[in-house]
Image (spheres, rainbow, N blue to C red):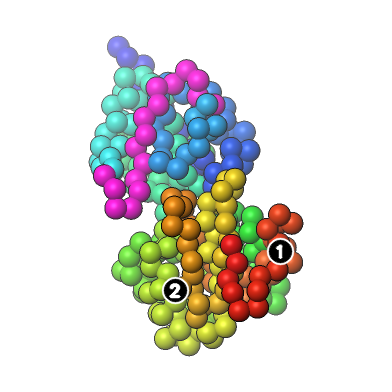
Amino acid sequence: MTTQGFVWLVGAGPGDPELLTRKAARVLGDADLVLYDALVVPEALALAPHAQRFRVGKRAGRASVRQETIERLMVQAARRGKRVVRLKCGDPFVLGRGGEEGLALAAAGVPFEVVPGVTSAVAAPALAGIPVTHRGLASGFLVVSGHAESAYGPVLTSLPPQAVTVVVLMGLASRAAIADLLLRRGWPRTTPAAVVLGAATDATHTWLGTLESLAAAPLPGDSDAPGTLVLGPVVSLAAVLAPASSAEPAPAAAARW
């Protein structure tokens, strides 16, 4: 009789392998099988030297493995006695379908554990010098998915102008629509705004501007990096808190990368 295996839903963090937790590194070292997201860096996968590794991540507009297939692979491998790591970007439970995968494992009677990771919703702004909360500027923050208006629309429309810092993941293509929605809701046109590309990687870029200019924010044409939108007064702090390597002042009327 085959011994029941185990599944770990592991957060890989925002990109820098040094931001993986010690527990994430340990379970990767014990893994027989790693099912990893598209943006997981090779250095993280190298922590699982004895495991079979399969890329199952999703990228917008591209062919990808169906969610049901991923869940079936985890269940089947665990039932064969395998130690499985489902390695997910950021944190498994922040816009990463980790909850769906946990429910599928529970329904199948497969034991599992969540290993939290550093979410890019906080890390991307922080690495660009933007605290998502700051006394006198923002006492809270909101994280939404920007892939469809049905996801972000009802939430953003319910917000009083500048009530909290708004962080949008997977929202690069929707930035014009999001800016328009907030402007129609009464947010000041001069509200500071940022786009952080490739946070926690060597290729990171940050654009700083205003809500009014967000739609026209120039994105590198050859960039395939994930992007995070940050909207609210706290973005103004990046001028002082951004890393020294990217803290050069921008021209008064221009955005900065």
1 or 2: tag closer to the N-terminus? 2
The residue closer to the viewer here, 219 or 231, is: 219
149 shown above or below 2: below
Between tags 1 and 2, which lies in front?
1
- How dense is the environment of label 1, judged by Cα within 10 Å: few (below 14), some, or many (20 and up)? few
Query: Circle 2 — which element?
Result: helix
The residue closer to the viewer here, 27 or 238, is: 238
In the image, which disc is placed on residue 248? Answer: 1
- Residue carrying label 2: 215
Q: In this view, does 210 lie to the left or right of 245?
A: left
122 shown above or below 36: below
Magenta segment, principal secondary structure?
A: loop
How many callouts does the rendering have? 2
Disc 2 residue type? Ala
Query: Circle 1 — which element?
Result: loop
Relative image position of residue 82 (x, y in whole percent): 38, 21
Whether residue 251 is visible, yes or no, is yes
- How dense is the environment of label 2, judged by Cα within 10 Å: few (below 14), some, or many (20 and up)? some
Q: Tell me what residue is drawn at x 58 percent, y 37 percent.
A: 17
Relative image position of residue 193 (x, y in whole percent): 55, 72
Q: How far apart are marks 1 and 2 (CA)?
A: 23 Å
Q: Tell me what residue is drawn at x 40 percent, y 73 percent.
A: 176
81 shown above or below 96: above
Disc 1 residue type? Glu
Relative image position of residue 42 (x, y in whole percent): 50, 32
Q: In which quarter of the image is residue 136?
A: bottom right
> If the image is split into quadrants, where does the N terminus sit?
top left
32 shown above or below 237: above
